[in-house]
Image (cartoon, coloured by chain):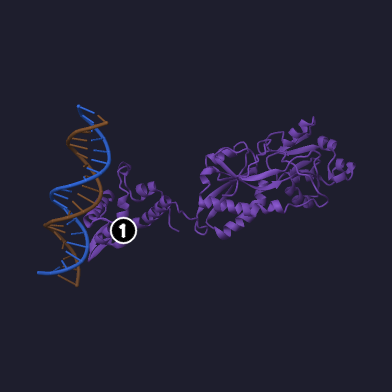
Chain colours: A purple, B brown, C blue
Amino acid sequence: MAALYSFDQLINYRFNIHMSNIRTFDLNLLRVFDAMLRERSVTRAAERVGLSQPAVSHALARLRSLLGDPLFVRQGQGMAPTPRALQLEPPLRTALSRLRSALQGDEEFDPASETRAFRIAMSDFFATLLLPALIRRIRSEAPGLCVQLMDLVPRNYLAALERSKADLVLLPELSFPDWAEHARLFRSPFRMVARAGHPRLRAAGRPPRHTVPLELFCDAPHVLVSPEGRARGHVDRVLAAQGLSRRVVMVVPHFLSVPAIVAATDLVATVPERLAWTLAPQLGLVVREPPVPLPAAQISMVWHRRAARDPAHRWLRDQVAEVLRPLDAGRPSAPDGPGTEHLHPAMPSPPLTPSSRGQPR
DNA sequence: ATCCAACCGGATATACTACG
DNA sequence: CGTAGTATATCCGGTTGGAT
């Protein structure tokens, strides 16, 4: 794969032109150089670039002076490139090609040949939903791409996007700033989980509609997921609005540690429904409806407006949407009854925006 | 804002060079 | 030595920057 060079790299490093000469460097000289490499003749190069033969000869003289190399020497009926000229040919071609694409605005994205890294910020739970299928697609269609998973810290995710530290962020829908664009992916309801032998649940018996009794929910020790380490989440605020409270005895930054903690203790937790149903059978957990109705979290992907038209970015967003959107249609249903939907307990009170402008492009 | 000299790039004319 | 091709001398028009 051809190395890629910025203009500065081309001029400074590859062409070895001192900074003081860059300001006055005539880009047309690069066109002449390119034409000379193609034609190996001053006269034909002149025809190619639409100049007279002496004009190209003069341009060549200026290039020779700038680069400190003859570049082309007479050989028979034409001009033979020097080793230095041949050395400069690949970066010159690349730079001119990219410049042409940029100016014409017709840059194409070829997944098979693209080499770049994408940084995606999301919770560990979303990562388990998305990454295996996403990486399978990328390995087969765009093997040169690298995906870097970043920790999701809600308070900082917008700053990460704005400062280009992250390319894409997956999170429950909040109100987004003007420069952000987003697309809805799927809805994520929540369930309460506890170990099957939990004494309070056993004493409560099999509850009607599988909703955990309110007093049990409030009395039981809770483990709360908060990437920011907050001791109160959205569930606490909803309870407080009804004059109620619960006991949070443990705060963890990641979702995936919760089921094991719940399985080994008498703690309970409110987690994404999909996580609950995935891990409940193997860890011996019971899944219950929380006693307070909460709307499901609307999970969206967010990106900076500056990346909106970037072809590689658009391709990546399409892949993420294709992998995650089916989750909305094919949500797992409770094996022992229907459920109401509940909001993420640890998310900072999201004002659900009615936006539908977010489409993945 | 205007003028003007200096500079630059390109054109024409012509000198120079390599090759068959 | 003729031909094809490159390099150079000179001129011209446009741009730039300093002086007024």
| Figure disc tally | 1
Q: Residue at x 31, y 51 (%)?
A: A28
Q: How far across and down, in percent of the image, does residue A142 sit?
A: 54, 57
Residue type, numbered disc 1: Ala
Q: Is residue A103 visible?
A: yes
Q: Nearer the viewer, residue A262 or A47?
A: A47
**Which chain's residue wears label 1?**
A
Q: How far across and down, in percent of the image, does residue A46 sit?
A: 26, 58
Q: Nearer the viewer, residue A148 or A170?
A: A170
Q: Residues within 10 Å of mark 1 (few under 14, many from 20)?
A: many
Report the quarter where the N terminus of chain A lies.
bottom left
Return the residue at label 1: A35
Residue A343: image quadrant is: top right
Left or right side of A147 for A232: right
Q: How far across and down, in percent of the image, does residue A55 sit?
A: 23, 53
Q: Residue at x 58, y 46 (%)?
A: A168
- Label 1 secondary element: helix
Q: Residue at x 55, y 49 (%)?
A: A118
Left or right side of A42 for A302: right
Left or right side of A46 for A181: right
User: Is A94 situated above or below A21?
Assistant: below
Q: Nearer the viewer, residue A27 or A8?
A: A27
User: Is A220 situated above or below A299?
Assistant: above
Q: Is residue A83 visible?
A: no
Residue A49: image quadrant is: bottom left
Residue A296: image quadrant is: top right
Left or right side of A221 for A73: left
Q: How far across and down, in percent of the image, does residue A194 sit?
A: 80, 44
